[in-house]
Image (tube, helix red, strand yellow):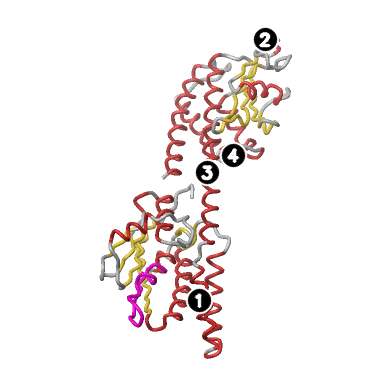
Amino acid sequence: MLTTACVALSSLLTFLLGLVLARLLWCRPAPPGEHRTDDATFTALHLAAMAAPALRAGLDRDSARRAVRHLRLLLGTRAVAITSTEAALAWEGPCTDDVLTYARAALAAGRTQVFPGRARGSERADEEAPDHGPEHGAVVVPLTVDGTVVGALAAYDDEVSAALVRTVTEVGRWVSGQLELAELDGSRRRALEAEMRALRAQISPHFVYNALTTIASFVRTDPSRARELLLDFADFSRYALRRAHDFTTLADELTCVDRYLLLERARFGDKLRFSMQVAPEVLPVLVPFLCLQPLVENAIKHGMRGPGTPGEVRVVVRDAGPEAHITVEDDGAGMDPECARRMLDEDPAREGSGIGLANVDLRMRQIYGDGYGLVVETALGAGTKVRLRVPKSQLSSL
């Protein structure tokens, strides 16, 4: 899964960075009275870990403000500043110079720029650099996301050594990596939001039409039943069309399924039988929004053998230790296993496909990994059983 891989890669890079920084910082001259200890690696890792959550939120004033203090301690310099391409976002330490003025050189060049400071010479470090260097020495590193410069990291110190340049450059690359991950998270979030909007738009118009037609048929003959069904339809629609997060509790998802089944039972009458068996301890488990109703809809659609022939749909939810196991089964005509495979391979975005098995299968694999796709057991004349596994513990990135 893409998000899991990114998190793992981020953790690995953070670890390796800590080792590199510890070695680089160790090589720098220690201030008078300060002694290097064996916990330098731990300190570097800890400071990187403290700065990472803010940077994973993207580059803005708030995230820069929360990260800059940890970056200054990580680098051990007099001051550190973070800029966007247009403004100084945050700084820590005695920054008396115009931070953005010196950052523009790195922003324009797209590479690290070094300024020795006025106390050690006033010559320009680059033809695009300011006419006068900063009061203290400075190393300015561009920050990039997907190859585009989005800001700069500037470190100020009394002396600009080769070790400091290397250290600031590596920290700048690490910060860019965190901002890249923030962009990936944002892209994933936007994709999931778009998918959820599309998912709601795919609520079967046939179901809506059939439900309203069924309700209308009871208006004259049984007004009380019509009122109850209308309330059930309103509850189902409110849930399915609400502005929701990507996840909901299993209890809420089962309530949605119950409302759906009541409406379908009113439509098919005694021809449709259904039962639900649920382990109470799994009701609080988080599941992907609208992951069960499509399975039940499929069971009804393919489970009815024909006019006048009754059919049964069974929903079973079991506690399986670290997972919740969900089974939706019908005793209908079943299908050729190859047909079931084609249903899972169907493009969920295809117009008219509805919220089918392919949509649920794709989302389960995207969220939890390929091992959590739907399992369909079927054969001609043997009914259909769809299995769904949901981990009880959610990834921190969800």
Separation of residues labelled 3 and 2 (CA atoms): 44 Å
The disc labelled 2 sits on which kind of residue?
Arg
Task: Say which element carries label 1.
Answer: helix
Task: Say which element carries label 3.
Answer: helix
Near-viewer residue (179 or 270): 270
- Name the residue that disc number 4 marks: 58
Instruction: Name the front one of labels 4 and 1.
Output: 1
Label 4 environment density (alpha carbons within 10 Å; few <14, some 14–19, many ≥20)? some
Q: Earlier in the sequence, mark 3 or mark 1?
A: 3
Q: Earlier in the sequence, mark 4 or mark 2?
A: 4
194 with respect to 346 (left or right):
right
Q: Position of residue 36 (x, y in %)?
A: 49, 21
The disc labelled 4 sits on which kind of residue?
Gly
Label 2 environment density (alpha carbons within 10 Å; few <14, some 14–19, many ≥20)? some
Numbered mark located on residue 211 in the image: 1
- Name the residue that disc number 3 marks: 185
14 with respect to 272 (left or right):
right
